[in-house]
Each structure stands twice: as C-alpha cells, then as structure tokens.
C-alpha cells in the first residue's frame, strides 16, 4: 500500500485541493457495522446543518438500511451486500464494481468515507466519480482524496467523524448526541406491547442487546 500511495501521489500531485461551496449532492460511505453507523449519526446532523439544501445519500450495509429510512438528515439510503466488512465473510468484487459504476449517475459533488479504508475510497469515492473526496486515508488511498486531514487516533469515534467535516469547513465542530429516527408506527407498536406488559411510563426503560 505504501508503494502504491507513493506512485499515486506522484500521478495525482496536481489534483485540486479546493472544494467549492456550491454543493448539491453528497455521498457518505459507512460500510462497517451497526455500532459504527450509530456513532456516525452526529456527523449526519452536522452535515445537514452545514449543507441544508444539499441532497445527502448514505451508502451502507444492506442489513442496516432500515435504521435510516425515516431519517430527515438522509435523502436516500443505498444498500451494499457482500463487501469487505460483511459479516458473511464473502466479498463480491464484481458486484461492488457494478455498484460503484451505478453511482456515477448521481454525479456527486462531495463524498466522505468515514472509515478511511483504501478499498472504500477506491470503489465508492474514486470509481463512482465523486468530484471532491474527503477521508482520512489511514489505510492508504490518500492520493485519491482532495482533502485528507491528519487522523485523530485518540479521539472518540463520534469526534473522528465530525473532524472530517470540521477540516472541510475550517470550523470547530463538537459532535452532539447519537440519535436514530424511529418509525412512528413501529414506535406505536412497541408502546402497545409494553403497555400490555404493565410498563410504568413514569420510569425509564433500559434495554440491552448482548448479542450485538
């Protein structure tokens, strides 16, 4: 990867490092697991605040798309299967290549890879035709990025995500709380079931899923 980065840095030396202010369509890539997606929600909040008129798309594992189907911060959720972080342990390179090429039709102005992975940067920021690409590039691929800030290794995951946006906007940003939008009908169903179980609404309810 080091040698590839070195060669790439020479080939892409004159790439633009300025990102325009008129951003109309944004792609955010988060292919890893459910906890990482939840830790990314403060980033989505800040991104929507910075670009209120932009169309924001999220590319994530097909198993987790339902988490963001009712999220006003995200305009479209795009599923990906059989990738390198898949729990199934199967990577379909041909399918991923086809998905990357399909993304070209959206003509993204700006793209973020929150993981900082060479493969993700190459397939879903570079091959997909995103005009301006932002990530940490800690596992290689920094030469394909227009903005590649220093990786804040000691920061919390929510801070790492928001720092990418802070580096882009030249503003000091503090991540807020993690937050997921819940489907109103699903919430009503759960409340009905809890009521049948005799839940006291005056007391807080703590739920733990130990198999995550």
Image (cartoon, grey):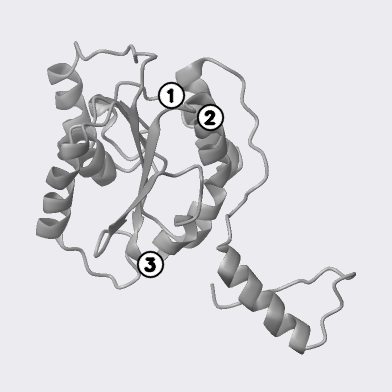
Tell me the quarter of the image containing the N terminus. top left
Q: Secondary structure at mark 2?
A: helix
Identify the residue shown where x is 57% and y is 17%. 171
| Residue picked out by circle 1 | 149
| Residue picked out by circle 2 | 163
Q: Which tag is nearer the camera, tag 1 or tag 2? A: 2
| Residue picked out by circle 3 | 63
Is 149 drawn above or below residue 124 in the view shown?
A: above
Tell me the quarter of the image containing the C terminus. bottom right
Identify the residue shown where x is 25% and y is 60%. 83
CB-based contact (under 8 Å), mark 1 and mark 2: yes
**Crowdedness near tag 3: few (<14), some (14–19) or many (≥20) residues, C-alpha within 10 Å:** some
Is 186 drawn above or below residue 120 in the view shown?
A: below
Identify the residue shown where x is 70% and y is 80%. 192
Q: Position of residue 65 (x, y in %)?
A: 40, 60
Q: Secondary structure at mark 1?
A: loop
Toward the viewer: 148 or 170?
170
Q: Is residue 119 left or right of residue 37?
A: left
Identify the residue shown where x is 77% and y is 89%. 197
- N-terminal of the two: label 1 or label 3? 3
Q: Secondary structure at mark 3?
A: helix
């Amino acid at each position: 990867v080091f040698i590839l980065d070195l060669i790439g840095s020479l080939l892409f030396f004159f790439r633009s490092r300025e990102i325009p202010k008129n951003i109309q369509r944004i792609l955010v890539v988060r292919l890893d697991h459910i906890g990482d997606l939840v830790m990314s929600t403060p980033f989505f909040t800040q991104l929507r605040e910075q670009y209120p008129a932009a169309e924001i798309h999220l590319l994530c594992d097909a198993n987790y798309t339902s988490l963001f189907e009712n999220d006003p911060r995200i305009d479209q959720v795009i599923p990906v299967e059989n990738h390198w972080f898949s729990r199934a342990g199967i990577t379909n390179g041909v399918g991923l290549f086809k998905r990357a090429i399909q993304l070209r039709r959206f003509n993204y102005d700006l793209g973020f890879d929150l993981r900082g992975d060479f493969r993700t940067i190459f397939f879903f920021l570079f091959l997909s035709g995103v005009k301006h690409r932002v990530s940490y590039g800690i596992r290689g691929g920094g030469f394909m990025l227009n903005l590649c800030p220093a990786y804040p290794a000691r920061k919390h995951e929510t801070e790492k995500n928001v720092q990418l946006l802070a580096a882009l906007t030249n503003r000091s940003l503090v991540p807020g709380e993690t937050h997921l939008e819940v489907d109103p009908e699903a919430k009503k169903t759960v409340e009905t079931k809890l009521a049948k179980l005799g839940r006291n609404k005056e007391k807080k309810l703590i739920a733990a899923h130990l198999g995550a």
